[in-house]
Amino acid sequence: DQSTDTPDLDAIVIGAGMSGLYMLHRLRDTLGMRALVVERADDVGGTWYWNRYPGARCDSESYFYSFSDRLSEDLLQEWTWSERFAGQPEILRYLQHVAERFDLRRDIRFGTTVTAATWDEDGTRWLVDTDDGRRTSARHLITAVGCLSTTNLPEFPGRDSFAGESFHTGAWPHEGVDFTGRRVAVIGTGATAVQAVPEIAAQAEHVHVLQRTPNYDIAGGNRPMTEQDAREIKENYTDIWARTRETGFGFPYDAPERTALSVGDEERRQIFEEAWQRGGFRLGTTFNDLLLDEAANDTASEFLREKIRERVHDPAVAELLCPSDHPFFTKRPPLENGWYETFNRSNVTLVDVRSNPIEQIVPTGVRTAEAQYDVDTIVYATGFDAMTGTLFKLGIRGADGVPLAERWADGPRTYLGVAATGFPNLFMITGPQSPSVLSNMPVSIEQHVDWITDLLRHLQENGQDRIEPSEEAEQGWIDHHDEVSAATLLPRANSWWVGANIPGKPRRLYPYVGGVGVYRQLCDDVASKDYEGFVTSAAS
Ligand code: NA7
């Protein structure tokens, strides 16, 4: 309705993944608002809708990669995960179940892409254009677009000349891909390739894995969830969630109190070994200075390199798989379940495309500086334009028509990673400069959604319609973010966390590394001081 300036809706949410589903529930069922979710896919699920490649699995343990008691104590008690680390199909089923259970689909417009979102100052509202030709207005706009939702397909010369089939892991065909008898090239060795390659290798005739940078992969330790596991977890959920909200990464693991060099070599080894045996990101939480002190970090890096050398039979291949250019955990360490052993198979070849770079895609395969690999299928496990890629594609224009991409040309500018000066009534769930990808996502998602919900309630109760962070508050947050980043080893590595994977992307640490617990406290402090740093007003 554009005949008046009154917004059609109270809020539009973009994205129906975990964030969008929970946000819709809060807006509609907690605040009583008129809300709509716009989703480009034809169903809910977000990341878990798109990433259907073989082996796709969550790297957070299933029992805390879910909605907490904030959403529903009953759901927590009724839902039982089949594995310690859930696979994509099970997580998608879970999110579909949540959509059913809370009757969310009726307020989601599926198969619809946002093409522009323009702030209308006179109407104190967002005008949201979608590819179905409609324009819908809302007082508030909330992005729930995830952090890894715009795929990165490198511009290799000749890419489109390839005569076989090619797939990006983040846009996998729903019907799946049968690799039987196929010769396959997988480009990339990040978390995705590490999950997919063992599955593809079990089927394909031959797999060439094209590696530019080796990672410190951690043992995944996936196994079935036993009845006893499930019982213990369900009995302890109150404590589990409390811990996830306080710790640095949003995991319920004990926060380390020791530095790595405060213990002897033998004891340190045992601590690493125990964490390794238990699997998952525990290894990153063994000592409190692994991300701060290079000498401490070296001990973990060397432990992991030893593991690689033990498991990969060919010493030359093992050395190629050993990282040496970056400290442990300054790039996201993949979790692996049989990745290293895959290189002992006769049908798997590791190709070092650092020393022997990919030059061109040709109709029959991949040509590097030194050789040509003829294949039937190319799998691009080349990652994402993380954190900002999707936000920029939305065509957001704030006050005075300034595009978000322009305002952020030198890097993201946010207050608390959730709001931005010049973009009134815009909220970003797990936006840049919030813990987001440096945390167990559901914990950060819930914190953001609940905090935004409280803020909107505060506006409702005070008769305020417009909110925007002040320049000073925004600059203060950026300064704090940069200071915390610089105190860690993270800016050193060429990771997607610093935007290094996308040509021309400003090099900044995108997620906030101050920790989930600290961040929550900072957000709560802002709220308790009547949303300090924000400027509010009533619609004229
Ligand atoms: P990642 O972690 O960004 O990995 C992408 C991989 O693709 C990585 O090994 C890259 O090498 C490689 N890559 C990217 N571009 C190229 C080019 N041009 N040539 C050769 N190799 C290339 O993405 P994932 O999908 O594995 O994981 C993303 C996140 O999803 C993950 O961290 C979890 O949070 C879930 P590089 O290391 O840049 O040298």
Image (cartoon, helix red, strand yellow):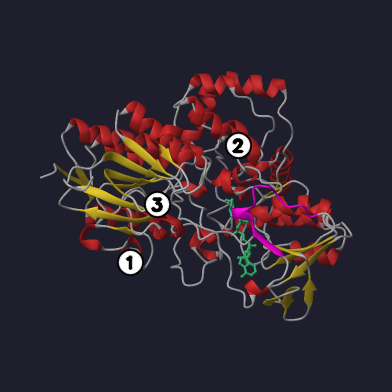
Tell me where residue 30 appears, x and y as whole percent: 34, 27
Q: Is 212 or 295 nearer to us in this picture?
A: 212
| Chain-order first, disc 3 or disc 1 | 3
Q: Is 356 above or below relative to 76?
A: below
> Which class describes the residues within 10 Å of circle 2: few (<14), some (14-19), or many (20+)?
many
Comparing labels 3 and 2, the label whose residue is closer to the camera: 3
Q: CA distance from mark 2 to mark 1?
A: 36 Å
Asked whether the residues under the numbered discs 3 and 1 touch, taking CB atoms below 8 Å apart as contact, a structural biologist would say no
Q: Which residue corresponds to mark 2?
A: 91
Asked whether the residues under the numbered discs 2 and 1 touch, taking CB atoms below 8 Å apart as contact, a structural biologist would say no
Q: Is residue 286 left or right of residue 430?
A: right
Instruction: Say what amino acid the circle numbered 2 marks.
Output: Ile
Asked whether the residues under the numbered discs 3 and 2 touch, taking CB atoms below 8 Å apart as contact, a structural biologist would say no
Q: Is 270 above or below relative to 380?
A: above
On-image quarter of the N terminus: top left
Q: Residue furthest right?
A: 346
Tell me where residue 14 appears, x and y as whole percent: 40, 46
Q: Is 154 above or below relative to 434?
A: below
Q: Is residue 176 magenta?
A: yes
Q: Is 416 or 129 nearer to us in this picture?
A: 129
Q: Is residue 343 left or right of residue 55?
A: right
- Which type of secondary structure does the marked residue at label 3 adopt? loop
Task: State the mark number for residue 196.
Answer: none
Tell me where residue 207 appears, x and y as whole percent: 80, 61
Tell me what residue is drawn at x 48 percent, y 37 percent. Answer: 443
Magenta segment: 165-179
Q: Residue furthest left?
A: 540
Task: State the mark number for residue 132.
Answer: 3
Comparing labels 3 and 1, the label whose residue is closer to the camera: 3
- Which type of secondary structure does the marked residue at label 1 adopt? helix
Residue 517 appears in the figure = no
